[in-house]
Image: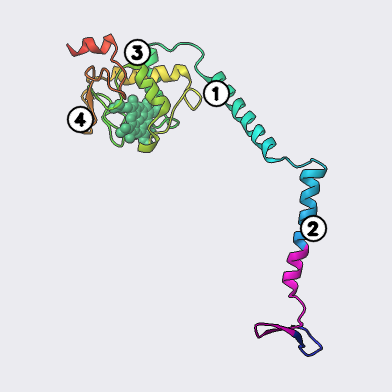
Amino acid sequence: MAQGRKDELLDHDADGIQEYDNSLPRWWLYGFYFTIIFSVVYMVHYHVSGTGKLMTAEYEEEMQAAESIKKIAAANAPKKELPTSPLTDAASLKKGQEIFESTNSLCATCHRTDLGGQVGPNLTDEYWIHGCDLPTIMKNITTGFPEKGMLPYGSTNKLTDEELVQVASYILSKQGSNPPDPKPIEPERDVKCGANAGTEQNTVATTDTAVKQH
Ligand code: HEC
């Protein structure tokens, strides 16, 4: 390493191991200088001038940010109570159909324009995986089934409360429409509408749907 002079053996040894009087490699020295400078800057930044945030301060700040996110979510929650039975007027159902087939919502790409089912299940029969009353269907549209590929179409995302009611009502208006070649039911998961009271996934059927059964 040392240039311009011969390596000199130092005259001490440890257990027979001797060493040359070489200067330290440049990369090592610069690394060493860097750590010294870094430590000074670090100390001034965090402990002398107080311009850096210590762990507790950062923690407090993140907790506050989380609080404000919670507040925003609460402010965006549906303001008014949503209806519990489906709309039946032609104008609302037409709106619902437009939403179902729109390129924004894409419901029809997975459930077909006749709702017979493709990627998503058939929505016209009395068998449902997640429940069949209006509030449950609206909740399912809001949360979606991301693990199955259906995005959440919630009130804070893409669909307004009004559109949510319209599209869910449209789906229910197609009950029993019997489209050709529907997607087969999943016997282990599908539950007949009205027979699902009390299970955790499916909320209690409304009187409306229970009456339909008999
Ligand atoms: C990318 C495909 C996809 C899109 C787009 C999609 N869905 Fe779905 N949907 C699914 C799948 C898959 C399921 C079944 C989830 C499961 O197996 O648990 C489902 C389930 C449902 C269910 C529950 C059915 C049941 O049997 O309980 C409803 C209601 C529903 N979708 C409505 C909609 C509406 C309304 C839209 C548009 C706003 C929509 N879906 C868009 C794939 C999709």
Pointer 3 local density, CA inside 10 Å: few below 14, some 14–19, many at least 20: many
Please tell me which of labels 3 and 4 falls first in the chain. Answer: 3
**Corner quadrant of residue 134:** top left
Query: Where is mark 2, residue-wise?
Result: 37
Can residue 93 be seen here? The reply is yes
Which sits in the foreground, 148 or 182? 148
Q: Amino acid at mark 2?
A: Ile
> Vertical placement of 204 versus 151: above or below?
above
Q: Looking at the image, in which quadrant does ligand 1 appear?
A: top left
Please tell me which of labels 2 and 3 falls first in the chain. Answer: 2
Query: Where is mark 3, residue-wise?
Result: 86
Labels 1 and 3 touching (C-beta < 8 A):
no
Q: Residue 192: percent from the left, percent from the top? A: 21, 22
The image quadrant where one finds the N terminus is bottom right
Q: Amino acid at mark 1?
A: Ala
> Vertical placement of 96 versus 211: above or below?
below
Q: Amino acid at mark 3?
A: Pro
Please tell me which of labels 2 and 1 falls first in the chain. Answer: 2
Which sits in the foreground, 140 or 29? 29
Which sits in the foreground, 36 or 118? 36
Labels 1 and 4 touching (C-beta < 8 A):
no
Q: Kindly report the distance in space between the C-alpha atoms of the residues bearing marks 3 and 4.
A: 25 Å
Query: Where is mark 4, residue-wise?
Result: 180
Q: Kindly report the distance in space between the C-alpha atoms of the residues bearing marks 1 and 3.
A: 26 Å
Between circles 3 and 4, the one closer to the viewer is: 3
Q: Amino acid at mark 4?
A: Pro
Q: Which mark is residue 73?
A: 1
Pointer 1 local density, CA inside 10 Å: few below 14, some 14–19, many at least 20: few
Residue in the picture at 23% in, 16% down: 194
Q: How is the image coloured?
A: rainbow
Q: Kindly report the distance in space between the C-alpha atoms of the residues bearing marks 1 and 4.
A: 42 Å
Pointer 2 local density, CA inside 10 Å: few below 14, some 14–19, many at least 20: few
